[in-house]
Amino acid sequence: MLEELRITGLGVIEDTTLPLAAGMNVITGETGAGKTMVVTGLGLLFGGRADAGRVRAQPGRAVVEGRLRLGGRVAESVHARIVDAGGEPDEDGSLLLSRTVTIEGRSRAHLGGRAMPVSTLGEVGEQVLAVHGQSDQLRLLRPAEQRASLDRFAGPEHEKLLDALRETYARWRTVVDDLADRRRNARERNQEADLLRLGLDEITRVDPQPGEDDELKAEAQRLEHAEGLRTAAQVAQQCVAGGVEAADDAPDATALLGTARRTLEAQAGTDPALGELAARLEEAATLVTDVAAELSTYLAALDADPARLQTVYERRAALRGLTRKYADDVDGVVAWAERARTRLSDLDTSDELLDELDREATRLAGEVADLAGRVSASRREAAVRFAEEVTVELAGLAMPHARIEVAVLPRPAGRSEPSLPVNGVETGVGADGADEVELRLLAHPGAPALPLQKGASGGELSRVMLAIEVVFAGSGGPPTLVFDEVDAGVGGQAAVEIGRRLARLARSHQVLVVTHLPQVAAFADRHLVVAKDTGGAVTTSGVRVVEDTERARELARMLAGLPDSDLGIAHAEELLAVAAKERRP
């Protein structure tokens, strides 16, 4: 649940904190007091779009902060996502979130003590919060949203089936598009393939090896300076180990080191320090001997071979011919060849490949049609249950004679989507199946079943929306539900029933309700009032918790606009007593 919400510098709200409780939280206040800013703040906190026009000029930025305390699988999922992003929950398991929007439109987000992308707040919001307002009622009128609502209700097995359909549909469309592209652009593909083959043939003839250009460059330098290298190696060898050209009495490094070592060893008995130095000279002599041996090997391998030098020149020239055309160096040429081979397979328009792709497309089309048929059957089964449960809820919302029908119809073929035979009928098929779903309302017995957008008034649509949400609540969903004036256009007994249903939702969810109806507000576990202060030069609003007498006065204001009326307060107290009695389990 959301334990606390602090809003600073947003709209008419200068700085206020909303202490929220489990159960049903109601937010009321005069028109224009800033109730909408509370919902706007919630939207910002959970990744909604920032509107710099709502930021107060002073202090020039809006800040929304919240504290979440989650449990169960939602907590595991959200905490894992936050830890993966570098944040961490507090020691007590709660989670801090914040969103800052400046008057210039810049936005920052923090989650679990770390700066995060705003999209991460949105990911968390999808799991913990669902906001329903009058715009959501309009969204419910769209066929795609009605189909999505039915799919959510149908349950996890249906979701698995739908995921399988989406995956298979994507593979089918990929193969179909690939096949069509190969056939449509066969000439251009063949021209590109010919050019690639010419390049590959040239590279194959030269057969460059990775790093070969650097190796040849080094070898060319050795061959070009072979005499100088030989002279240097010979002189060094003579100095360390003597040689045939050295004078008979010319000492070498090895002999001198041996003499020095033996001299020190003769006096080691007198002073052990000389013995240690003699051992080090022995190590030096061993090292010099090794160098002498390596110099001898180097001289034996060094060969001023003009023929080999010419071969190296020719090979480097061949490699330069490739690097002028295909890449900056030999390694790049080798990589170009690999890419060209891969691209050639993509450009293949042979009859064998086209036939193979055609068979694969046909096979996948059959799988898509089969899965679409199974999804349709699952939707029809869920539609019956969905309609029955929503109809029961409508009866409890002062619409006892109304009935909801959910029509699952084949999608007409011939639109922008491809068509396939599904259950023996040529039907338009998309990633979401082959169905059109339509919610229909029978307002009273004998009335025709009309689509919601034609058969429901504003008040009826509000109750249908709430009934659907109550039904969804039984299937899980986010733990916190926000209703922003979804009771608009409703009054009397229907308003009382809406309050009862929201209170029922609050038994399993945290519910936040922005309302103008005292019949709804009376059912709250916590009542928050947004009050406007016009005493200063700038209008501001704050939020306070009301209880007991203050709460009765607020309900009296909502009932008759007379917070000090004895009759209004008596009516409000009666409402509160009835609601308290019905809230008991």
Image (spheres, rainbow, N blue to C red):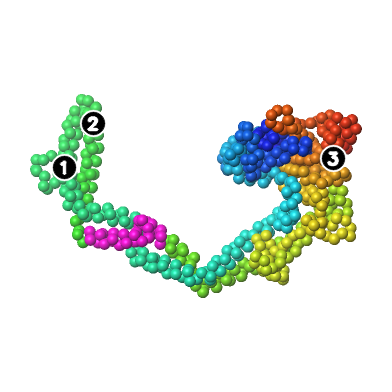
Q: Position of residue 153 (x, y in %)?
A: 74, 53
**Disc 3/disc 2 C-alpha distance (Å):** 103 Å
Classify mark 3: helix, strand or loop: helix
> Residue 236 vs residue 191: left or right?
left
* Mark 3–mark 2 CB contact (< 8 Å): no
The type of residue carrying mark 3 is Gln
Left or right for 569, reference 469: right
Question: Can you name the residue that lies furthest to the bottom here?
Answer: 351
Question: Viewer-proximal residue, 367 or 319?
Answer: 319
Of tags 3 and 2, which is closer to the observer?
Answer: 3
Q: Residues within 10 Å of mark 2 (few under 14, many from 20)?
A: some
Image spot of residue 547 (x, y percent): 81, 30
Label 1 is placed on what type of residue?
Cys
Determine the secondary structure under disc 2. helix
Residue 374 in view here: no
What's the distance in space between the residues labelled 1 and 3, CA to CA? 109 Å
Label at residue 239: 1
Q: Residue at x 67, y 32 (%)?
A: 14
Asked if 85 appears above or below 91 in the picture, the reply is below
Query: Which residue is label 3 attached to?
Result: 519
